[in-house]
Image (spheres, rainbow, N blue to C red):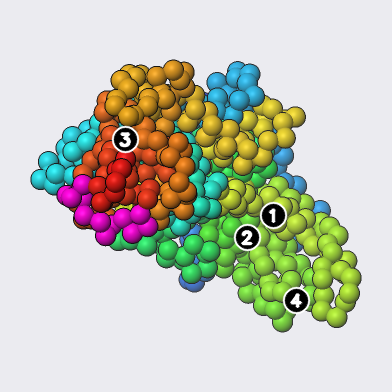
């Protein structure tokens, strides 16, 4: 799961084509293509991009390019400034002269590898291709290690004193209940175990106790805290992150149209690489660069922003966002993909560079990103409504179009033609037909891969509030894995009508019922006045829990047969106990091994059970004086 080693610098790059070993782009390819030290003369060499015109860059003083630059060099990918752009003589406005390069799409989109071989209609089988037992064993190992590393506590009733190592089967139950919280939204995690009607959710208590769930959540860990790499800000989640991203690429190939955009995980705590963007719905949090399939929203690649460059670069003239583009495209170069990006990433030079990797690009363009001067200087007053201005060279076309404002776009595979567009105008009841450039119309349709991903994640969001960013981010990765598994399921079962809700619910059912719940293997002997109803059951039972703040209204109905005391079934303890309700109302902590069958309230046999079922204010009667003065006490 480590990145491939850095390729050595070589002279195989030419001004006509940028070649990579095996047609594959490695995470360090950009560093090799940028600047590298020549082992022969020990001098740094600047290298030129594929298919870049040989004309020199014109600056404010019309400086000529250095003659000492080797002809086999490729310049580094970087933002263009107003003082460093291609001269206008390179650009043409003749539509007939523009012939974009046509690369056939040679990839096979859809599931591949183990996902392509899987013949199943069970949703959990597809999720377990991503959340494998190998990954869950890693989480169990680090969670148990972290729990053992905690210092012992002096509190006699602390939950940490009852810690038992978590297993893969139990971790699946834990994640199953966590997925279920996304389907049943409640403001607080503890409310899922509350028994007050009508919001009670007994399935949670039936599957796992609240205390056990909370202590697993408290100790959930993903790496060894004693062997952290201090130079890696993501070292605490690195193993899970690399494993899941490798699975995303291993199991699915996106369609021809792919898009890159940012996704933000809400985080308001203190964090060194937290970002703030007021233009986004989630304004503050952890930002991630995501490459997704425009058709399905499948997350193929991801790069969390942590402040440092994607690849170690010894120079500062290469923008981080453009290195991110090359990093995310690993495994997709050479197939004729069409990449859609917004103006945060795009530049003319980046488009030419990616064209040498057989990757078409299209997207909006900011000012001073290498566009010709005729495009840069355009204003609203210079264009009619709907008018366009086009310039192109041998590889790239730049278009400016006036809509509500002047919008600029760079593309390497569109013709300069118009399509019909229905637009609603003020004062008109019906939409008015207008003309829009084809590249703008297709951009609106294809630049939505990450938006589809975010939209589906928001439907059943189970990422919980926590004080540790590592837990929240890993839950974010697992939520993405659930959606990716749903895309794999729909691709392999196109006739299935399951929705994302039904897919998650099926996974929850499989992980919480297919595994063993609350091991009740030992039958408890029948005690005096206590019946045992668990010894003949095949399925392990569970002990329902009554509301603590409110007593059930049926406790004083006079039906003694309905209020028999039954022994609390075994859990991880052979003889578990609970706090007696009557003693608790008297301010005394006393455990009991039985509870009322109808009220689901733990009670001590004798005086406590009698007072609870006969007295309205049972907390006012003393417990040390025995039964009240009756002729025939029970």
- Left or right, 620 with reference to 127: left
Residue plotted at (53% across, 28% down)? 510
User: Does residue 455 sit above or below 382 in this rendering?
Assistant: above
Quadrant assignment, res 567:
top left
Q: Nearer the viewer, residue 259 or 153?
A: 153
Q: Report the residue marked by disc 2.
A: 364
In this picture, which residue range is highlighted in magenta?
615-626
In the rendered image, residue 198 lying in the magenta stretch gets the answer no
Label 3, label 4: how far apart the Cα atoms are = 84 Å
How packed is label 3: few (under 14 Cα within 10 Å), some, or many (20 or more)? many
- Lower position in the chain sequence, tag 1 or tag 2: 2
User: Does residue 374 sit above or below 454 in this rendering?
Assistant: below
In the rendered image, residue 620 lying in the magenta stretch gets the answer yes
- Marking on residue 594: 3
Label 2, label 4: how far apart the Cα atoms are = 18 Å
User: Does residue 59 sit above or below 194 in this rendering?
Assistant: below
- Lower position in the chain sequence, tag 3 or tag 1: 1
Residue 446 spot, x, y in % from top left:
68, 50
- Lower position in the chain sequence, tag 2 or tag 3: 2
Residue 238 spot, x, y in % from top left:
34, 39
Q: Report the residue marked by disc 4.
A: 383
Determine if residue 610 is in view: yes
């Amino acid at each position: 799961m480590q990145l491939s080693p850095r390729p050595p610098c070589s002279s195989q790059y030419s001004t006509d084509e940028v070649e990579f070993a095996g047609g594959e782009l490695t995470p360090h390819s950009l560093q090799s293509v940028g600047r590298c030290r020549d082992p022969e003369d020990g001098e740094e060499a600047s290298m030129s991009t594929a298919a870049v015109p040989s004309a020199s860059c014109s600056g404010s003083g019309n400086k000529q390019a250095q003659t000492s630059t080797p002809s086999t060099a490729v310049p580094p990918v970087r933002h263009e400034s107003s003082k460093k752009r291609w001269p206008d003589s390179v650009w043409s406005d003749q539509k007939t002269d523009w012939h974009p390069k046509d690369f056939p799409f040679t990839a096979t989109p859809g599931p591949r590898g183990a996902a392509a071989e899987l013949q199943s209609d069970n949703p959990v089988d597809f999720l377990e291709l991503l959340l494998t037992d190998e990954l869950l064993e890693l989480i169990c190992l680090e969670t148990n290690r972290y729990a053992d590393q905690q210092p012992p506590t002096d509190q006699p009733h602390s939950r940490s004193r009852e810690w038992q190592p978590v297993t893969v089967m139990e971790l699946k139950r834990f994640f199953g209940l966590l997925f279920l919280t996304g389907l049943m939204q409640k403001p607080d995690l503890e409310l899922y175990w509350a028994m007050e009607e009508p919001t009670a959710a007994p399935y949670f208590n039936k599957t796992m106790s609240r205390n056990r769930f909370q202590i697993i959540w408290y100790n959930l860990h993903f790496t060894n805290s004693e062997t952290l790499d201090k130079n890696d800000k993501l070292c605490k989640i690195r193993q899970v992150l690399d494993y899941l991203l490798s699975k995303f690429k291993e199991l699915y190939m996106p369609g021809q149209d792919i898009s890159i955009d940012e996704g933000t995980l809400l985080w308001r705590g203190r964090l060194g690489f937290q970002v703030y963007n007021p233009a986004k719905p989630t304004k503050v949090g952890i930002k991630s660069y995501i490459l997704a399939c425009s058709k399905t929203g499948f997350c193929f690649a991801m790069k969390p922003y942590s402040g440092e460059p994607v690849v170690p670069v010894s120079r500062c003239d290469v923008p981080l966002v453009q290195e991110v583009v090359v990093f995310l495209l690993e495994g997709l170069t050479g197939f004729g993909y069409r990449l859609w990006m917004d103006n945060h990433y795009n530049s003319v030079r980046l488009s030419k560079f990616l064209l040498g990797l057989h990757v078409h690009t299209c997207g909006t363009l900011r000012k001073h990103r290498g566009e010709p001067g005729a495009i840069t200087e355009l204003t609203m007053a210079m264009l009619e409504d709907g008018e366009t201005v086009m310039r192109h060279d041998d590889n790239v076309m730049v278009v400016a179009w006036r809509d509500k404002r002047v919008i600029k776009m760079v593309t390497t595979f569109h013709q300069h033609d118009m399509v019909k567009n229905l637009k609603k105008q003020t004062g008109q009841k019906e939409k008015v037909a207008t003309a829009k450039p084809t590249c703008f119309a297709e951009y609106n349709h294809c630049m939505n891969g990450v938006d589809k991903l975010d939209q589906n994640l928001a439907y059943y969001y189970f990422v919980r509030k926590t004080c540790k960013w590592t837990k929240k981010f890993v839950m974010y990765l697992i939520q993405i894995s659930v959606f990716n598994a749903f895309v794999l399921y729909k691709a392999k079962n196109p006739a299935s009508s399951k929705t994302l809700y039904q897919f998650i619910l099926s996974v929850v059912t499989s992980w919480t019922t297919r595994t063993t719940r609350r091991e009740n293997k030992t039958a408890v002997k029948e005690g005096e006045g206590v019946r045992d109803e668990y010894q003949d059951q095949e399925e392990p039972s569970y002990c329902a829990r009554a509301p603590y703040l409110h007593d059930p209204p049926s406790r004083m109905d006079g039906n003694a047969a309905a209020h028999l005391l039954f022994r609390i079934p075994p859990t991880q303890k052979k003889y578990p106990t609970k706090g007696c309700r009557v003693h608790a109302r008297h301010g005394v902590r006393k455990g009991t091994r039985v509870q009322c069958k109808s009220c689901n309230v733990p009670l001590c046999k004798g005086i406590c059970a009698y007072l609870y079922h006969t007295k309205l204010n049972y907390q006012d009667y003393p417990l040390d004086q025995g039964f009240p003065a009756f002729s025939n006490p029970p």
